[in-house]
């Protein structure tokens, strides 16, 4: 009993903490399938009774939903690819090479993370506005323009994340492969790069969440309604709901729809995130 009782208590505590964490998500999903009149009842019902798909149909049929979805998917995909490419090269240079100014570069990356995003809004708006007069593809209300801003905001912390993964892979693996006849590039691509897959996935998840949920930068540089992302669309959807009385059931349905791509993305990458970094890579 002395051994079992502490395990049981810790298990109960873990389940309680998990329940507290999961409840807001459960309530959002439940509210998405609950009529607004029933949702306003006191006391509220925490069980799925008399559910309906009307809220989801209303959200999906909104004329601006599909354009906002395409905008968010395009911006997020481009941001993840660009961030991983540049952050990986930066982390590789920091971890594998010794060069003058290396420590200063690391401090600069860390310092950039300390800058408040709100302090850059005016400069970002003016930059895209001026660039858009020359190259419209990188101006306001453009996918490439906001992708550049997202990349600049996300890449510093991503470099720090990948730096730890790259440093965790022994360089002796590459040296052993080079002894066996591979060039440095071949040794890196065949031996080291596959071992960095969990780090790339974890960094990609971070970049995906930051780009998908970002609101403030998009609010500044995407003023046109036809170029809004899903967070901006949700704000407009809420404002339209306020004019006729807040329909929280539809708002929760819209929030649930926005969360679906994130869940799907996690389902695809969860195996890589939980796999070991260099398990079994070194022969004993």
Image (cartoon, rainbow, N blue to C red):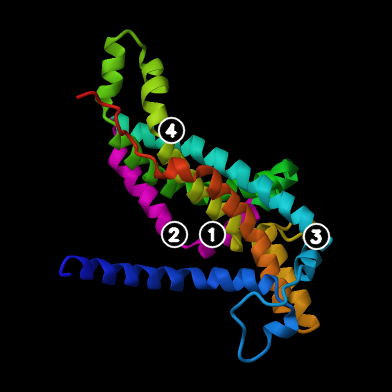
The image position of residue 12, as x and y in percent, is: 33, 71
Q: Which contiguous range is marked in magenta?
A: 98-127
Image quarter of residue 16: bottom left
Q: At numbered mark 3, what does the secondary structure look like: helix, strand or loop?
A: loop
Q: Secondary structure at mark 4?
A: helix
Sequence-earlier tag: 4 or 3:
3
Q: Quadrant of residue 81?
A: top right
Residues marked 1 and 3 touching at CB (< 8 Å) = no
Q: Nearer the viewer, mark 4 or mark 2?
A: 4
Q: Residue at x 65, y 64 (%)?
A: 256
Query: Sequence order check: which comes first, mark 4 or mark 2?
Result: 4
Residue behind mark 1: 120
Which of discs 1 and 3 lies nearer the camera? The answer is: 3
| Mark identifier at residue 89 | 4
Assess disc 3: are there few (<14), some (14-19) or many (≥20) residues with their C-alpha within 10 Å of its C-alpha. Answer: some
Q: Measured along the vertical axis of the image, is residue 34 above or below residue 206? A: below
Q: Position of residue 245 (x, y in %)?
A: 77, 84
Q: Compared with residue 249, is residue 197 higher up or lower down, i.e. above or below? A: above
Q: Which residue is mark 3?
A: 64
Residue contact between numbered discs 2 and 1, judged by CB atoms under 8 Å: yes
> N-terminal of the two: label 2 or label 1?
2
Q: Which is more foreground, mark 2 or mark 3?
A: 3
- Kindly give the residue lying farthest to the front in the view shown: 1
Observer able to see residue 178: yes
Is the N terminus in the top left, top right, bottom left or bottom right quadrant? Answer: bottom left
Identify the residue at horizontal 54%, vertical 54% (top origin): 209
Q: Which mark is residue 115?
A: 2
Q: Is residue 246 shown to the viewer in this render?
A: no
């Amino acid at each position: 009993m002395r051994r079992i009782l502490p395990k049981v208590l810790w298990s109960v505590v873990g389940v309680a903490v998990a329940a507290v964490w999961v409840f807001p998500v459960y309530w959002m999903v439940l509210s998405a399938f609950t009529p607004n009149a029933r949702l306003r009842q006191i006391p509220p019902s925490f069980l799925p009774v008399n559910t309906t798909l009307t809220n989801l149909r209303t959200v999906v049929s909104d004329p601006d939903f599909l354009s906002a979805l395409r905008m968010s998917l395009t911006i997020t995909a481009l941001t993840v690819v660009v961030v991983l490419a540049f952050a990986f090269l930066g982390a590789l240079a920091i971890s594998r090479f010794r060069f003058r100014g290396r420590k200063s570069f690391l401090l600069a990356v860390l310092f950039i993370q300390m800058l408040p995003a709100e302090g850059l809004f005016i400069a970002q708006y003016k930059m895209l506005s001026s660039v858009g007069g020359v190259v419209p593809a990188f101006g306001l209300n453009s996918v490439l323009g906001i992708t550049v801003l997202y990349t600049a905001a996300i890449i510093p912390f991503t470099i720090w994340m990948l730096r730890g993964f790259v440093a965790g892979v022994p360089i002796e693996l590459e040296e052993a492969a080079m002894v066996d006849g591979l060039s440095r590039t071949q040794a890196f691509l065949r031996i080291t790069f596959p071992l960095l897959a969990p780090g790339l996935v974890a960094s990609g998840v971070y970049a995906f969440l930051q780009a998908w949920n970002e609101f403030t930068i998009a609010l500044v540089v995407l003023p046109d309604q036809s170029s809004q992302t899903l967070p901006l669309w949700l704000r407009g959807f809420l404002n339209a709901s306020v004019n006729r009385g807040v329909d929280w059931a539809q708002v929760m349905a819209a929030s649930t729809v926005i969360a679906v791509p994130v869940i799907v993305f996690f389902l695809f990458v969860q195996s890589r995130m939980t796999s070991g970094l260099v398990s079994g890579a070194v022969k004993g």
